Amino acid sequence: MIERPGTPRSPYIDVEVAQRLLKAFDFIILGLGALAITFDTAGLASAPDNDALVGFFCLELVLLSMLALRSLGLYEIASLRSGFRSIALSLAVCLVCGALNHLVAKVTGLLDLPVQWFTAWALFTALYFAATRGIAALWAAPLDRAGRFRRRIAIVGGGKAAEEAIATLEASPDLDIDIVGLFDDRFDDRSPQSIGTHKKLGSISELAFFAREHRVDLIIVAIPLSAEARLLQILKRLWELPVDIRISGQASKLKLSPRAYTQLGNLPLLAVFDRPLTGWGSFLKSTMDRGLAVLLIVVLSPILALTALAVRLDSKGPILFKQRRYGFNNELIEVYKFRSMYADRSDANAIRLVSKGDPRVTPVGRFIRKTSIDELPQLFNVLTGQLSLVGPRPHATQAKAQDALYEQVVDGYFARHRVKPGITGWAQINGWRGETDTKEKIEQRVLHDLDYIDQWSLGFDLYILAKTPLALLKTQNAY
């Protein structure tokens, strides 16, 4: 039986995103500050011929400062969480870069910068770093203590291969990881109950459950590549999870090109499956989702208000209908819709799919379902982060095709939950919206959903959003 060590459902925070945002902020604010200081102290406001030279000087100063900050590791979490040390070192770097630029400008005669320029630069950067790095420390320190910047790794396998992989990871310097435990189907001498301090938590089937209940960022399969049948069986059982999956290179006797491997510390890994959305891409998609959701709510507010009034006048009951559906990583979420059925005939679990001429549907409900207006309240699900604007449509937990649950009809069904579900998607604009009562319909939906996941890009999302209004005009499958 699987152990359930307490932790963390709170998500991993990708350091790359935090670093990029801080670098962008540094570039903008330090650049604007340098321009303002240079024009003010050098008295160049009335000399437009010097604009290009001043711009180049300030750009070079900011880029040199940021390059030095990066080279000294001052954008790393270990530095940002330190507070005073981060402020002092960042300030020292910018003062040195400012002094060098001031000296070069003086010696070359390109710009006549007074001493007041350096004084103003020192004061400005001192205030800037005290504010930004102080705030960064207040943000990063508690999250770092909670392990939010550490990748949580599950090891699949046991015996010598797993032991070597764990030993290599633990011997790697400056590696922010937590090994959550071991998972293996073998329960004999070949696979001990623990390796060092790391315990076996269950079988490989239980790993799939564990990864949905706890945070797992990476799965390392530590078994020899020569065990091909076992390896394929393991990967087939894990590929539906929204987790990076790698094979330990130490477990292979094949000597592949170094370019075939990625490195985690000193451990070589062979990439098998990647989580579809990570880091900067995930951040950009989430930002676009929320920004466009706010805009759409404002633009469509008259339609939302009129629909709410029509639902209220059409039949007794609440305006909104809440339904539990599968979300990201198979988590259950509550999705909002305008109520389209008579309140006493509603089917919260979608045990019986809505069909053409369904007597449970109200007159207003029939119209808003055909036009998909009933889905508009899901924009608020986007604001809460439960849904995306674009992604696989979320299905009700008991939805069936041909009297069988979807996951029983389609092999690999849960792989569509490796990304957040969406209000619209690749399947919907290709005609696979509405009723999914047959095996072909649900298979086509899942096929298009997996194709979307493989092809994802922001441009692809925008293309699907642009095509959605045209797809809504084809209402033959919407009941």
Image: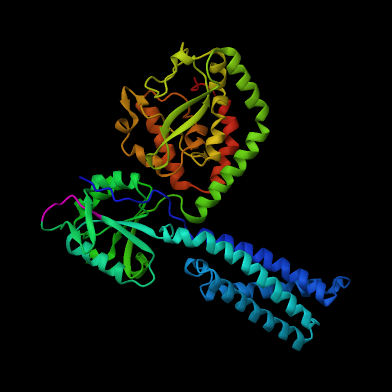
185 part of magenta stretch: yes
In the image shown, does 414 or 382 lie closer to the viewer?
Answer: 382
Q: Residue at x 65, y 79 (%)?
A: 95
Where residue 245 sits, quadrant-wise, is bottom left
**Image-based side of 189 in relation to 364, left or right:** left
Residue 26 lies, in percent from the top left, at 63, 66
| Quadrant hosting residue 350 | top left
Q: Residue furthest right?
A: 46
- Quadrant placement of the N terminus: top left
Identify which residue is drawn at 43% across, 57% down.
148
Residue drawn at the location 39% of the way across and 24% of the way down:
349
Decide if residue 386 is on the left or right side of residue 165.
right
* Number of on-image labels: 0
User: Taking 283 as reference, is 149 above or below it?
Assistant: below
Q: Is residue 451 above or below residue 269?
A: above
In front of the other: 336 or 478: 336
* Vertical position of residue 182 compared to residue 393: above or below: below
Residue 154 location in percent, x, y? Answer: 30, 55
Image x and y of residue 400, in percent: 35, 25
The span shown in magenta is 182-188
Q: Main secondary structure of the magenta part?
A: loop
Q: From this viewpoint, is residue 424 visible?
A: no
Q: Position of residue 466 (x, y in %)?
A: 60, 38
Residue at the top extreme, as displayed = 359
Magenta highlight on residue 365: no
